[in-house]
Amino acid sequence: MKRRTWLLSALGATGALVVGWGVMPARSRLGSPALMLKTEGDVALNGWIKIAQDGSVVLAMPRSEMGQGVHTALAMLVAEELDVPLQRVRLEQAGADSIYGNVAMLVASLPFHPLDSEGDHKPVKIKMGEWMVGKIARELGINATGGSSTIADLWDPLRMAAATARASLVQAAAKTWQVPAGDITVADGVIQHASGKSAHYGQMGAAAAGSTPSGVAPKSRQDWKLIGQPAQRSDIPAKVTGQAQFGLDVRLPGMLFAAVRMSPMLGGSVSAMDTKAALALPGVTQVVKLDAWGGGTGGLAVVGKSTWLARQGAQAVQAQWQAPNSGALDTTRIQAALLNSLNTENGFTFHEQGVPAQSEKAAAKRIDALYQAPYLAHATMEPMNCTAQVKNGQVDIWVPTQVPQMARAMAAKVAGVKEDQVTVHVTLLGGGFGRRLEVDFVGQAVQVAMACAGLPVQLFWSREEDMTHDFYRPMHLAKFQASQDEKGEITSLRIKSAGDAITPRWMARAAPHLSGPIDMPDKTTAEGLFDLPYGFPSQHMSHVATKSGVPVGFWRSVGHSHNAFFSESFIDELAVATKQDPLAFRLNLLKDAPRYAAVLQLAASKAGWGKPLPAGRAQGIALHKSFGSIVAQVAEVSLEQGQIRVHRVVCAIDCGTVVNPDTVAQQMESSVIYGLSAALFGRIDIVGGEVQQSNFPSYPMVMLSQAPKVQTHIVPSTRHPAGVGEPAVPPLAPAVANALFALTGKRLRALPLVV
């Protein structure tokens, strides 16, 4: 029996046991006040909220800020429920308790079709599946910033925590003043009564401590004052003035610096090294051989009194490198192996409806296409780094990470201490994009710190080391086959893809104690293919999971990033084959998916779809759902001296309830630039085990002069908030490719796009 079939059957059989239970109540994640950091004069009311003496509010922040604006958005939720000005909410890093774990991210990993899993009428199997995974996630308490899940995950728990804190403060005032709580109002953090009595939160904090008000509920939508309104990002002023602390900004008394140099071959190690020349340099203190922590590559680190001295020392070491036992990797051979797997293996079926084989047999015409996407690097603007200090049995790390608990576990493992002997200080992240879901560089930093006699040491990677030792987005291929009847209508769609599965590789690195017994299909391999909204009568989507040996990891929008290019480009091919306008063709297939159709129509309308364009320009359209949000994009493209030029991208998004519309627009713009860089330039080639691209000259980004105008239009919604940081990346490449076909008549089926 197929594993997914078995899972769903089991869920269906036991579903009756939990009908009506719903999801776990937000109150279950309130937590104890003891979880909050103890600070003089502040009073914790639950595991999320403290009240300071001056009446300001302190929020325990479990998520990492890497430019996506979550520190501001989460503070807005608290300010809304507590009726305080946004500027009066301060942040402190949350601890390691399970209440801070990311439940929504794990629930979203279930391989359910979105048209089955949306709304209030989900099948019992799906309700049971989400409940079970949510329960497991709640118990595991994995604190991770990823999957565009922060607001979706904390929307209910954080509002409930703030609303409960407000009720405790009002209740304390009512008891102190001997008046009914219902007669008390709150405005700008000041509690007031018609008798003239008033107090700010700080004056009632101690009296509110330990109370457990009942019947608490977050504000009704019509009472919101902050949520849904534009708000200035709280992290921007410090970034503009240079006061913000990223990982590379950490400076501690007596701090040393360590430059890494890893084996040029992925998975390689150091077999021998001559350190005499390096140690002879002034300011160079020692050379440390590095193990391959967290699934990375082995190498060495040179410690010096400055970054410059450490880098000079690293280059001076004469090293001999040992190839991995598995041999040297090569992308040309990997691509050939993928194609062979695609042609010879059945793969795992993620979705099937109708009778595809019957439609294929009766077809008057068959339409076939092969699409491919290369490996990609994350290329974060801040390369990997971590500052560590090992002293008196205690470990401190200062690290830009998306997974503080896993960083803590890695540090404890390397240092040979218990996890509660490790303190993690999470800095701002100079870009994450999924790369900082890995902790290989944390292991390196702690290993070096152990050799530095208690002094703190900042380990840093050069841009070249960063790009040639990444955990790359996998190379994927996809084969499409559509059947067309005598009337010209598409009767079936068959998709089979092949490529490495990310989640099992990541689990083996990050949580080996969990990865062993879990052997389920990886949704990320087929997302954006098996979950299409289009109403083809017969469909079959499968994936062949491979294991190339290349270190692979989560890349911004993960499988959607390439699968959307495959699927939305092929949908355009079908529109051409049926002699229909690409917009009209899609809308005809979206009669049972009105949300998708509304987003698509909004983007087309705002872009002026079908209206005359300047000479030499064409438009392309694409639609895709990922991380709970539906995004449609129209790209306006031309060729300038043979080079692709994208002039304008119009985005429409339905992301549910919007907390800060300015952040939504910023993330659409960020995603377009990131996605366009990959679509036009992105590729990682491996020859003889060595990555060929090493810096931005060989792995370009879109420059300011190449950046298109980006216009964002948000569909009003009362649904639960969905993701924003990633969903605009997937439709960008197909929108551009479809525009190029309209312009040139040439169909591009491989990334990066080359005319």
Image (spheres, helix red, strand yellow):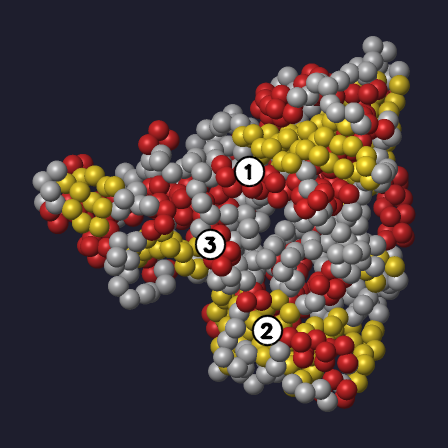
In this figure, which residue is indicated by the disc labeled 2? Answer: 458
User: In which quarter of the view is residue 356 placed?
Assistant: top right
**Residue drawn at 73 percent across, 54 percent down:** 377
**Residue drawn at 34 percent across, 38 percent down:** 218
> Does 136 sit left or right of 306 as displayed?
left
**Which mark is nearer the camera, 2 or 1?**
1
Where residue 351 appears, as percent x and y from the top left, is: 71, 32
The quarter in which the C terminus is drawn is top right
**Residue drawn at 86 percent across, 16 percent down:** 362
Q: Residues within 10 Å of mark 1 (few under 14, many from 20)?
A: some
> Does 452 sit left or right of 500 as displayed?
left
Q: Residues within 10 Å of mark 3 (few under 14, many from 20)?
A: few
Classify 279 as above or below 410.
Answer: below
Callout 3, which amino acid? Pro
- Disc 3 from disc 1: Cα separation: 19 Å
Callout 2, which amino acid? Gln
Q: Name the residue nearer the viewer: 418 or 167.
A: 167
For the residue labelled by badge 2, is the local secondary structure a helix, a strand or a loop? strand
Callout 1, which amino acid? Ala
Q: Earlier in the sequence, mark 3 or mark 2?
A: 3
Residues at discs 3 and 1 in contact (Cβ within 8 Å) = no
The quarter in which the N terminus is drawn is top right
In this figure, which residue is indicated by the disc labeled 3? Answer: 237
User: In which quarter of the view is residue 369 placed?
Assistant: top right
In this figure, which residue is indicated by the disc labeled 1? Answer: 665
Q: Earlier in the sequence, mark 2 or mark 1?
A: 2
Q: Name the residue nearer the viewer: 710 or 123.
A: 710
